[in-house]
Amino acid sequence: MASGAVAPPPTPLTGARRGFGGRGVLHRRRLAATPMKDEPVVSANGGKEEMATDSLSVARKSPLPGLSSNRPTVAPTPFHLAEPSDLRFNRLRPSIDESDCKHKRYFGRYVAREAIMDEEYWIAAWLRSENHYEDQSGDRYVESFKRKYASQEFHALKKRCGKQVGEKYTCFVAVKNDELTRTVLNSVVGTLDVCVRHPLHGEKYPADPGNSPFYSRIYQPDQPKFAYITNVCVAKYARRQRIASNMLLLAIDAARLDGAESIYIHVHKDNLPARKLYDHIGFKMVEMDGACHSSDLCLLSFSKH
């Protein structure tokens, strides 16, 4: 079960749906990948070898694109040839000290921080695809759908995070913090996005009534900034370890530092575990004429304890 509301490549104010919405369609390209599943990794303490099983294969009992050791796999391909990627499925994760991040939060055996590598963006996209199709494991075409969705989200995510004019869009990831030598793909266990920006001309804040669907693409720099959090999800095998709550706390701190005076998130009204989590963090439901923002989604705003 996903830990929060997530959405397909949205504009920051687009409501997140339960799971992930939309199915991107891409052509698949078969590429040989370096064997990595159940690869031996060397401990930095004593040099003993240990087996690091691919985390996402454990979660879904199926090979992750780019990690199969026995057959060609589907790797994400750019929508346009002018959008190259630096994906290397055998890239080793950097140490915590080598990660040049402005925001970090340590907790347990993990650390939450900004995504800094293409492989981290790819795993963030894959986790969202896994969550979107989590209840459709019996579909004969589900693996193909997941690969297409992840590929589309990977490119859209990089584009959103690269666009810093008028808004700041950041993808946060939770990664394993241990002494093992792991690949990047075997390290990421959770993800979320946060967008900080000024409202557009003609646009009201999410909590304000009567927000018109028609407004310009020109920001109002004289108005206070707000933040919107989307795509909260955690790998199935790593849930119930406070990963989502720590990513949320980091995202809130980062949004505050970037000048956001209000922070919003949507949650499916039937997603009781997510609503309980958000309430514990400090999010409160925004009343819209005594009802949720829509029949399926509720808008929450953050307030300090």
Image (tube, rainbow, N blue to C red):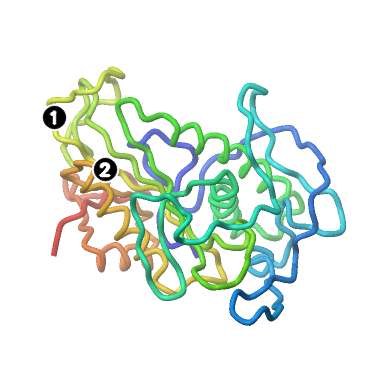
Give the SS element for disc 2.
strand
Q: Which quadrant of the view contains residue 10?
A: top left
Point out residue 254 in the picture as x, y percentages from the top left corner: 28, 50
Give the SS element for disc 1.
loop
Which circle marks residue 223 in the picture? 1
Relative horizontal placement of residue 248, taking residue 127 as reference (left or right): left
* Residue type highlighted by circle 2: Ala
Residue lying at 22% horizontally and 29% vertically, measured from the top left: 199
Q: Residues within 10 Å of mark 1 (few under 14, many from 20)?
A: few
Residue lying at 83% horizontally and 46% vertically, measured from the top left: 32
- Up the image or down, 268 lies above or below 288; here it is below
- Up the image or down, 153 lies above or below 140; here it is above
Q: How many marks?
A: 2
- Closer to the camera, 181 or 259? 181
Residue lying at 57% horizontally and 71% vertically, measured from the top left: 237
* Residue type highlighted by circle 1: Gln
Which circle marks residue 69 in the picture? none
Point out residue 58 in the picture as x, y percentages from the top left corner: 67, 70
Point out residue 301 in the picture as x, y percentages from the top left corner: 21, 51
Q: Quadrant of the C terminus?
A: bottom left
- Closer to the camera, 275 or 52? 52
Residue lying at 41% horizontally and 75% vertically, measured from the top left: 108
Q: Label 2 belongs to which residue?
A: 227
Q: Which quadrant of the view contains residue 81?
A: top right
Point out residue 267 in the picture as x, y percentages from the top left corner: 35, 54
What is the CA distance from the residue labelled 2 to the residue labelled 1? Answer: 13 Å
Relative horizontal placement of residue 266, taking residue 137 as reference (left or right): left
Relative horizontal placement of residue 225, taking residue 231 as reference (left or right): left
